[in-house]
């Protein structure tokens, strides 16, 4: 593939028409790669099987489960088919610890991992921010219980409800 650079004059200013041609050619090439993977440049390469480094994302783990999570997070590799996973503490809050999750794998496996660990919670005008946060915490606890088998003991359950309230509902 040959890319022609725009002809720049001596004053340091490029020819706008040449730049636009280059820009359109580059844009066309990118669109071709994105929408026509059978393009001759990709002969023999299966894009859906390519290993990528996925952009990092952040998850919130209740502080009372943080140690267990740190010990067991590697099972996510097996569950979601990622090749590599690294979890690092990002921020310690009063009731939660934020972890940054970095992973490598196919785009599909990495997206699956992120979607399972970051539940989508809809905002409702009728619910306060406190109620929404409470609901988000409960959803995350249920998710961690399903994935890792974590269980709330009576003290954790009592403290959890006192801290987060119990009137949150998801539409």
Image: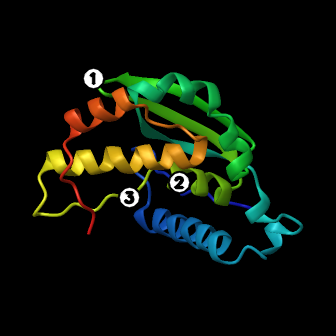
- Which is nearer the eye, 32 or 92? 92
Residue beneath label 2, please? 116
Q: Position of residue 14 (x, y in %)?
A: 44, 54
Residue beneath label 1, please? 94
- Which is nearer the eye, 48 or 5? 48
Decide if residue 1 is in sight here.
Answer: no
User: Image quadrant of residue 72?
Assistant: top right
Residue 85 image label: none
In whole angstroms, how far apart are the C-alphas of marks 2 and 3? 9 Å
Asked whether, in this view, residue 25 is left or right of residue 78, the answer is: left
Residue beneath label 3, please? 120
In whole angstroms, how far apart are the C-alphas of marks 1 and 3? 22 Å
Pointer 1 local density, CA inside 10 Å: few below 14, some 14–19, many at least 20:
few
Determine the residue positioned at 77% across, 75% down. Answer: 39
- Which is nearer the eye, 12 or 155? 155
Give the quadrant of the C terminus: bottom left
Determine the residue positioned at 44% across, 35% down. Answer: 152
Determine the residue positioned at 47% across, 29% down. Answer: 65
């Amino acid at each position: 593939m040959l890319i022609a650079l725009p002809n720049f004059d001596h004053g340091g200013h490029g020819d706008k028409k040449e730049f636009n041609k280059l820009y359109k050619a580059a844009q066309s090439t990118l669109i071709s790669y994105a929408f026509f993977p059978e393009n001759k440049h990709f002969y023999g390469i299966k894009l859906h099987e390519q290993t990528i480094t996925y952009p990092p994302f952040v998850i919130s783990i209740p502080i009372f489960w943080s140690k267990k999570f740190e010990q067991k997070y590697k099972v996510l590799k097996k569950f979601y088919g990622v090749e590599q996973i690294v979890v690092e503490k990002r921020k310690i809050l009063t009731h939660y610890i934020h972890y940054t999750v970095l992973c490598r794998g196919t785009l599909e496996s990495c997206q699956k991992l992120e979607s399972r660990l970051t539940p989508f919670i809809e905002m409702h005008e009728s619910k306060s921010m406190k109620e929404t946060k409470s609901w988000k915490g409960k959803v995350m606890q249920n998710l961690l219980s399903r994935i890792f088998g974590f269980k709330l003991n009576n003290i954790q359950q009592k403290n959890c409800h006192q801290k987060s309230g119990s009137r949150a509902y998801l539409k």
